[in-house]
Image: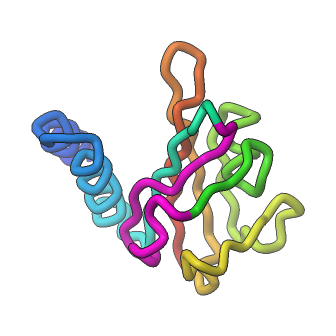
Amino acid sequence: MLETLRRIVQDVSAAPDLSSALAITVNRIRDAMNSAACTVYLADEDNREFVLMATAGLNPQAIGQIRLNRQQGLIGLVAERQEPLNLEDAPLHPRFYAVREVEEEAYHAFLGVPLIQYRRVLGVLTVQHT
């Protein structure tokens, strides 16, 4: 697993731009974890939202289109707590918020990890599985 992480870091570091780096990240993490989907939501500080910026396994048309307010859903919860959240059946959680456009209905298992730099949440990375 450490070798896999090292290769992901190398590939992301060599990416020409943020969009490419995020695409590499979600694809490689999804493959490494043998999961159905991986996404990255990044913080839009001006609008106090999280924006879907990359996905592997969910509807790619939703990239840049889905915006969640800072307190919305499991993404908001992970950001608020600034700690990982691992759920076996995410739709049963009281903070679960379904976003029809991303086509995630089939997935129940959820792992959300905050992306933090200098105590500031930059985004949330999620891994989902059936």
Q: How many marks?
A: 0
Q: Relative to the observer, which residue lies in front, 129 or 72?
A: 72
Horizontal side, residue 100 vs residue 33: left or right: right
* Rendering quarter of residue 48: top right
Indicate the quadrant containing the C terminus: top left, top right, bottom left or bottom right. bottom right
Against 86, residue 34 (above or below) is below
The percent position of residue 103, horizontal first and vertical second, equals 56, 82
Q: Nearer the viewer, residue 109 or 94?
A: 94
Front position in the image: 21 or 47: 47
Is 66 left, or right, of 54 in this rendering?
right
The residue drawn where x is 35% and y is 64% is: 30
The residue positioned farthest toward the front in the image shown = 46
Check the image and name the residue furthest to the top. 118
Q: Which residues are magenta?
A: 47-65
At horizontal 28% and vertical 49% (from top left) the residue drawn is 19
Is 63 located above or below residue 125 in the figure? below
- Asked where in the image residue 55 lies, by quadrant, the reply is bottom left
Q: Residue furthest bottom?
A: 106
Q: Residue at x 72, y 55 (%)?
A: 74
Instruction: Please provide percent x and percent y for residue 81.
Output: 74, 34
Question: Which residue sits at x=52%, y=13%?
Answer: 118
